Image: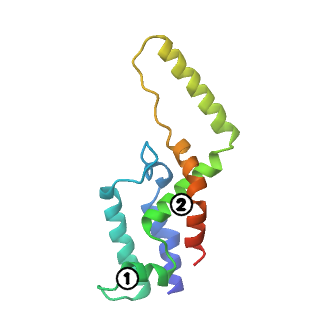
Amino acid sequence: MRRARLLYTATVRPAMLYGAQVWGVRDDGGAPAKSLLEPLQKVQNQCLRRITGAYHYTPIAAMEKEAAIPPIQLHIETIALQRAAKTAFNKVEKELAKALKGIWKTLVKRQRKTRWPLVPLKALRDRVKDRKNEIQGFLAY
């Protein structure tokens, strides 16, 4: 079981969630669309059944707890929040944001009808504070 879990967490899940720090969060900072998560959940459930050797009708939550693998939505949110927390105080990110703000200001001065893009990282940074304890409690299992 340990080797199967290691194989899933080291190869399958990273391949499925490549770039999830970016696509796993909507522009308003909310959770990804259900249609995006369903195929990922199906693959994870199949892998969990193989890892644990569970029957088809075994509850998914029981398999996740037995294999010590969090639900896919929680994992995507966790890695997105980790990225937001990591880049919150990054000097390069601040300089890029400053440069982009200057570009947008010049466009607005030219009377263009441009809309300031929503920054998912800003919304995620706010949620980092709220969800930190909840995620820590789940990962403690």
**Which mark sits nearer the N-terminus, 2 or 1?**
1
Quick one: which residue is furthest to the front in this view? 130
Quarter in which the C terminus is drawn: bottom right
Pointer 1 residue: 49
Q: Locate residue 12, reporting x and y percent.
A: 45, 69
x, y (%) of residue 31?
A: 42, 54
Q: Which of the 4 image quadrants contains residue 96? A: top right
Per the image, the residue denoted by label 2 is 78
In the depicted view, which residue is nearer to us: 23 or 26?
26
Residue 21 on image: x %, y % = 50, 52
Task: Identify the amino acid type marked 1.
Answer: Arg
> Which picture quadrant has residue 122?
top right
Q: Residue at x 64, y 50 (%)?
A: 86
Q: Secondary structure at mark 2?
A: helix
Query: Measured along the vertical axis of the image, is residue 67 above or below residue 89?
Result: below
As helix, strand or loop, the secondary structure at mark 1 comes to helix
The residue lying furthest to the top in this view is 110
Q: CA distance from mark 2 to mark 1?
A: 23 Å
**Of labels 2 and 1, the one closer to you:** 2
Residue type at tag 2: Thr
Residue 4 vs 134, above or below: the answer is: below
